[in-house]
Image (cartoon, rainbow, N blue to C red):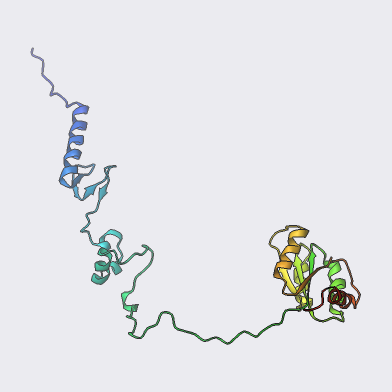
Amino acid sequence: MTEEKKPKQPKSGTSKKSARKATEDSATSGTAVTPNGASAAGDTNANGEIQANASTPPAAKNGNPILLDETYHGLREENRVVMRRTIAVNLDNFRAAPDNFDPRPRRDYPNLPQVDAPFFSVVVPTYNGLRHMAGVLGALQQQTFSDHEVIVVDDASSDATAQWVAENHPWVRLIVNRRNVGFAPSCNTGAAAARGRYVVLLNNDTEPAATWLAELARTLRILMPPS
């Protein structure tokens, strides 16, 4: 009896080599081989992914019907339109500017009223000193020497000092630090914002007499008479 010869099965390595060869050939010809052996038009990148040709219409890439507009497509090809994919473009809303359009028109504003600088700027730094503010501000409000301004610098208090001052003493210039910086920096902040000829630092737990600023002004005028 003769043995029946079985047909030889192709080695698995052969099919892999053929698939690799087909992929290399498709990279040079502009077509890509899909897993089922079919070819797809387009270019392939370094990872073997299929990319659409540059001639593919934009609407075919992302399905946006607005991109079918010939005007938009022409501008896009000339790199004159730069937009995100999520922004819809309605070209009908665009209008050409008139010939007399002035992007920077001249505007006339009224002159700001001149404010004379006060003689004194009283700077009151405070940190969680709400319990003292009524006394010190009330005393300053009763000063017989009226040529002065009061600046309260709240050093990021947590006891609603700034809110209380703003609601009950709107005549006070209020500065609120975003974070606690300490006594000396708060004094410097108030002094930098002062408009007066002389800066006076006052603790928030004091209640000066009604003639306090008047006596201080008299002393300064004796020591430093106006030229």
Q: Which residue is drawn at 86% across and 71% down?
A: 136
Split into 4 quadrants, where in the image is the C terminus?
bottom right
Query: Is residue 25 shown left or right of residue 71?
Result: left
Q: Is residue 155 visible?
A: no
Q: Which of 126 and 9 is in front in this view?
A: 126
Split into 4 quadrants, where in the image is the N terminus?
top left
Residue 97 is situated, as x and y percent measured from the top left of the image, at: 34, 81
Q: In which quarter of the image is residue 66?
A: bottom left
Residue 130 is situated, as x and y percent measured from the top left of the image, at: 82, 67
Residue placed furthest toward the front: 227
Residue placed furthest toward the left: 2
Query: What count of labels does the image hold?
Result: 0
Q: Which residue is drawn at 32% across and 80% down?
A: 96
Q: Which of 181 and 43 is in front in this view?
A: 181
Query: Is residue 9 shown left or right of residue 154?
Result: left
Residue 193 is situated, as x and y percent measured from the top left of the image, at: 70, 70
Residue placed furthest toward the top: 1
Q: Residue at x 23, y 70 (%)?
A: 70
